[in-house]
Image (cartoon, helix red, strand yellow):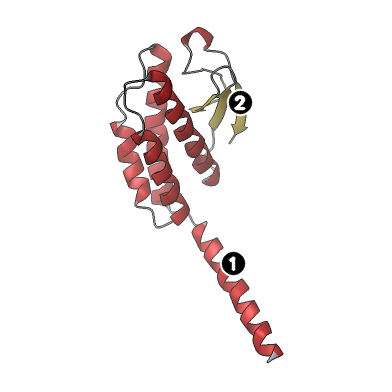
């Protein structure tokens, strides 16, 4: 009986390790979908650096998220769903609320880029606005506050 319990415990450990290892596998399609999302995010960042009017159309980002949501990796599809929820809250009515949701989207995007080891994508934080953004490179370009474009810090570097 004692041997049976030991074998069951070992099998449980093996299954748990196997599931967690399998969930960490990232396909080439996952990486391509994430790169598409990062490209769309870069377009939004560039747009925000040139205007004070609020966020542009998020259609490209939503399409890239749809692709990520189809991933067989549960971690990726789960994070894609979280980012979709963040974007659904962006109504185009209150800029500050929209920026708050975009900041939450950026935090999730940063974590996914880190999980997939995407280089040159960094997470930044502005303490004055209490918001995050994701951008290529190390240069601080705060998209939330036109009067403080250089306010913020690099908080996570890939």
Quadrant position of residue 8: bottom right
> Which quadrant would the C terminus be assigned to in this image?
top right
Q: Nearer the viewer, residue 31 or 6?
A: 6
Indicate the secondary structure of the residue bearing disc 1. helix
| Residue drawn where x is 36% and y is 33% of the image | 89
Quadrant position of residue 84: top left
Total marks shown come to 2
Q: Of the two numbered discs 2 and 1 on the same chain, state the one appearing first in sequence.
A: 1
The single residue placed furthest to the bottom in the displayed view is 1
* Left-right relation of 20 to 74: right
| Residue drawn where x is 37% and y is 38% of the image | 36
Q: Which residue is mark 2?
A: 154
* Left-right relation of 140 to 3: left
Can you give x and y, in whole percent of width and height, for residue 93 in the image? Answer: 32, 21
Can you give x and y, in whole percent of width and height, for residue 100 in the image? Answer: 46, 26
Can you give x and y, in whole percent of width and height, for residue 131 in the image? Answer: 52, 25
Indicate the secondary structure of the residue bearing disc 2. strand
* Left-right relation of 93 to 132: left
Q: Nearer the viewer, residue 136 or 52?
A: 52
122, above or below 51, in the image? below
Answer whether labels 2 and 1 touch (C-beta < 8 Å).
no
124, above or below 14, in the image? above
Question: For the residue carrying disc 2, how many other residues have a C-alpha within 10 Å: few (<14), some (14-19), or many (20+)?
Answer: some
| Residue drawn where x is 43% and y is 50% of the image | 78
Q: Nearer the viewer, residue 53 or 118?
A: 53
Q: Which residue is mark 1?
A: 17
In the image, which disc is placed on residue 30? none
* Left-right relation of 97 to 59: right
In space, the residues marked 2 and 1 are separated at their CA atoms by 34 Å
Question: For the residue carrying disc 1, how many other residues have a C-alpha within 10 Å: few (<14), some (14-19), or many (20+)?
Answer: few
> Which quadrant would the N terminus be assigned to in this image?
bottom right
| Residue drawn where x is 53% and y is 10% of the image | 148
């Amino acid at each position: 009986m004692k041997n049976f319990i030991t074998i069951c415990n070992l099998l449980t450990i093996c299954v748990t390790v196997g599931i967690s290892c399998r969930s960490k596998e990232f396909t080439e399609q996952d990486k391509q979908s994430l790169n598409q999302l990062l490209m769309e995010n870069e377009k939004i960042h560039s747009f925000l650096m040139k205007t004070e009017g609020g966020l542009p159309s998020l259609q490209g980002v939503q399409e890239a998220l749809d692709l990520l949501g189809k991933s067989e990796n549960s971690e990726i599809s789960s994070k894609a769903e979280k980012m979709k929820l963040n974007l659904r809250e962006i109504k185009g009515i209150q800029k500050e609320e929209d920026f708050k949701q975009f900041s939450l989207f950026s935090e999730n995007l940063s974590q996914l880029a880190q999980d997939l080891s995407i280089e040159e994508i960094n997470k930044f934080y502005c303490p004055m606005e209490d918001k995050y953004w994701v951008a290529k490179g190390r240069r601080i370009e705060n998209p939330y506050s036109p009067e403080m474009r250089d306010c913020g810090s690099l908080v996570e570097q890939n």
